[in-house]
Amino acid sequence: GGTLAGAAAASGRFAGTAVAADRLDDPAYARIAATQFSGVTPENAMKWESVEPERSRYTWDDADRIADFADANGQDLYGHVLVWHSQLPAWLNEGDFAPAELRTLMTDHIAATAGRYRGRVDRWDVVNEAFDEDGTFRDTIFHRALGEDYIAEAFRAAHRADPGAELFINDYNTDGLGPKSDGMYRLVKKLTARGVPIHGVGFQSHLVLGQQPEKMRANLQRFADLGLDVVITELDIRMDLPVTRKKLLRQAAEYQAVTDACTAVRRCEGVTVWGFSDADSWIPGWFEGEGAACPYDEAYRPKPAYHAMRLAFTLA
Ligand code: G3I
């Protein structure tokens, strides 16, 4: 039959998935990732702790592997992530750096990582999860040392390293209208007005069954109206276990609604799921008693959510 990638392409968009480098050895996993999806995002392989676990010792193997996979399959590569408070190497997190030194470490990291994949990454998450739930800036090592200017500096460094990449800021719980999304809106409005090279906003969309975000389409549209592209970057919809037929059908309707919210907005470039199979999802490891958040089940069979997402792209 058809594919998610094909249905998305017919609406002028991409259908992406997060991939784990060590799962590409499994032929069943690799086949679905290569054929059903037109974009890939490294789930962990490009994060700072992955690429520079010890200071100045770089480990690019897993990231290279995913970039090569995307090239081999003609897929978009979504780089994730340059500046984030989580999954920082211990030497950085526990180091006591003066502000000027931290600024140099940050811009050097961006130059090394975005520079290595220059011309191959279509979109970069330059800054991830900069906000608290109330829409104020999150207290991170970067914000503490440099104030909110670390964000503009990070985008300028990424643009120098890879002038052709589309540069995104990404967050969760900003999918619908609300205080956190308002904080994001105020920031990107200011950045674009100041000429900072920012091209898009990523909406992670780690959702909970039965709790659809408030006015998602209207929210995506207001960012698009600023002249920015938007992407659903990390979609999954988790549920309390055990799985029932009823929950799976409700989940399908919610996958369809999220995909519809994207296709209703001209500048929404695509939807990426945060792992395609329940067998590989981060959810059970983080939320006790929850799971089944992905469009494929643990045996790599498509769930109702898969068909609903495909249908939404097809009808768009
Ligand atoms: O690689 C080690 C392995 O050597 C070790 O044995 C094992 C034991 O815990 O841990 C492995 O590292 C884990 C890593 O994923 C790779 O599997 C970490 O513990 C675990 O914390 C890490 O979780 C990742 C999480 O980000 C960390 O914050 C998830 O896989 C990943 O899906 C998740 O992704 C984030 C996005 O980057 C940003 N948005 C939210 C999203 C979900 O949290």
Image (cartoon, grey):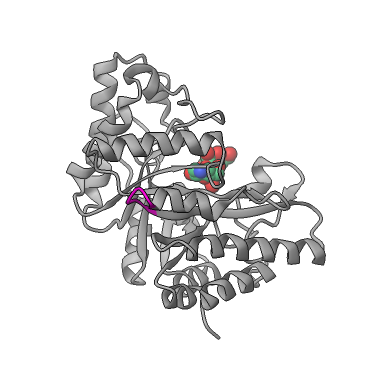
**Where is residue 61 drawn, in percent x and y?**
34, 51
Q: Residue 162 vs residue 179: left or right?
A: left
Residue 227 visible from this viewpoint: yes
* Residue at the image position 38 percent from the left and 58 percent from the top: 66
Q: Residue 86 vs residue 120: left or right?
A: right
Residue nearest the viewer, comparing 27 with 103:
103
Q: Main secondary structure of the magenta part?
A: loop
Q: Is residue 215 magenta?
A: no
**Where is residue 20 drawn, in percent x and y?**
48, 55
Q: Which residues are magenta?
A: 225-229
**Where is residue 197 drawn, in percent x and y?**
24, 43
Q: Is residue 64 above or below residue 106?
A: below
* Residue at the image position 40 percent from the left and 41 percent from the top: 47
* Residue at the image position 68 percent from the left and 65 percent from the top: 253
Q: Is residue 116 above or below residue 49?
A: below
Q: Is residue 75 above or below residue 280?
A: below
**Where is residue 77 drawn, in percent x and y?**
35, 59
Q: Is residue 228 magenta?
A: yes
